[in-house]
Amino acid sequence: MRSPRVTPDARIDITAEVCPMTFVRTKIALERLPVGGVLEVRLKGDEPLRNVPESARDLGHTVLGLDRLEDGTWRLLLRREAAGC
Amino acid sequence: MLTEPQIQRYARQLLLRDLGEKGQESLGAVRVHLALGGSLAGAAAAYLRAGGTEVERASTSPGPWASTPPLVGSPPARRLDVLAAPAAPGRSGVVVGAAAGAHVLWSIAEEGCHACLDLARRDLAPPEVRGPAGIQLGTLLAFLVQRRALGLGSPLEGIQMSREGVLSTVSAPDCIHRPPAVPGSVLAALLHHLAAALPDEGCAVLVGREDGVRLVPMENAQAAHHARDPEAFPRTARTAFSLDPRAWLTVLREADQAGERVLAIAHSHPEGPPGFSDEDRRWAAPDGQPLLPGVAHLVVAFEGGRPRSARWAVWAEGDFRESDCPLPAEHE
Ligand SMILES: [Zn+2]
Ligand SMILES: [Zn+2]
């Protein structure tokens, strides 16, 4: 999934976190953004790669893109939606 | 914003759909005054503290429920009372009682109607709980308190738990202590009807339910009364109104058949004065008690043929309380 060219409004790095803190960090960061704001999440490992985009979608947010970076981590772009909390 | 220790401590519940950072802050923004004892209070306090809410207990014995104090940012600004029936919270809180073999909890928000709560809790006995039921009820109590802290739920809500532990909601009484919500279109039709009666006083009845209000235009029977018996009815329709008893009975019967009730009686003051007059008061409560309990009064004052103000008068806690009724803007 290629990410569109958007400038994120906020960035978090959860490569050092484990479940459930990976999504706790993401959820709080999304809640701190205005509706429509874009969050860039840097993540690593199978578990967050599976859970974080899915949990964000479950709450009503939009997954804009997911890219693999050269250092082996992933860059997830999320848009905060009104429904999500 | 939550601090790092708070995020660590409340991580699990921060994941919940309806909670999040703002919700967690709301849980920490109330201080619960718990005036109950026993396992019920112990369980409620433990549950609330674990969720991040400060609890002050009337009884200080820690018992088996000694719990870690919550992590809160700043001192809680809101107070929530939890009391045993028949006591009532000053502003916001939960009343715990017993009725007909079940445990009953009433929860009221600051903006909830306290006169309605008074009716709801009037028949409650103090709670009588022991053993496992207390823990179950304490958890339920904590849940109601958290809903209040989070601003969820209706302003007055009741829940009951049977002796077998089955939960069900208890519906709040239809509020008769506040003016009904009247849609602008109904209000506009009322003004039109009252204007048509000028220079006499006009009158009308508003009937309906919580979800809908309709206007029943009425004739002012005062002119006929005065013509027939000027001694018993010295005032003319210019300065007084009365409802024809037969027409009134028809309104009551039709409302009853439709599952509605009479919400308000409206009348006009053709040349002022604004508001519920002493004469209106005497008519509506001749013996110091309302003639029509649960019925609000709406007075529309005209000036030079145009409506200038509308005032509600609603009986609550021993007197008529007046409040403004905003007029629809584009009335001609
Ligand atoms: Zn009420
Ligand atoms: Zn009057």
Image: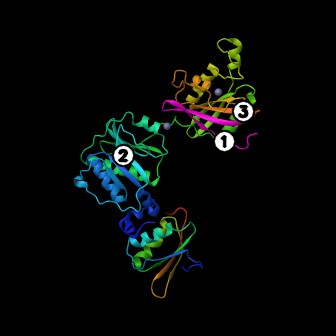
Which quadrant of the view contains residue B104? Answer: top left
Q: Which residue is mark 1?
A: B184
Residues B20 and B102: in front is B20
Q: Give the secondary structure at mark 2.
A: strand
User: The disc labelled 2 sits on which kind of residue?
Assistant: Val
Disc 3 sits on a residue from what chain?
B
Classify residue B285 by image quadrant.
top right
The residue at which mark 3 appears reads as: B302
Q: Which residues are magenta?
A: B308-332
Question: Which badge, 2 or 1, comes first in the chain's sequence?
Answer: 2
Name the residue tied to disc 2.
B82
Please tell me how crowded label 3 is: few (under 14), some (14-19), or many (20+) other residues with Cα within 10 Å.
many
Say which of marks 2 and 1 sits in front. 2
Name the residue nearer the viewer: A56 or B282. B282
- Taking the magenta stretch, the answer to whether it contains residue B31 is no
Residue B40 position, x and y percent, is 29, 48
Measure how far apart labels 2 and 1 are at the Cα level: 39 Å
| Same subunit, tags 1 and 3 | yes
In the displayed orientation, state which residue is furthest to the bottom.
A70
Q: Residues within 10 Å of mark 1 (few under 14, many from 20)?
A: some
**Residues at marks 2 and 3 on the same chain:** yes
Q: Based on the displayed image, in which of its 4 quarters is residue B89 positioned?
A: top left
Indicate which label's residue lies in the foreground, 1 or 3.
3
Q: Is residue B250 visible?
A: no
The secondary structure that most of the magenta stretch takes on is strand
Residue B157: x, y in percent? 44, 44
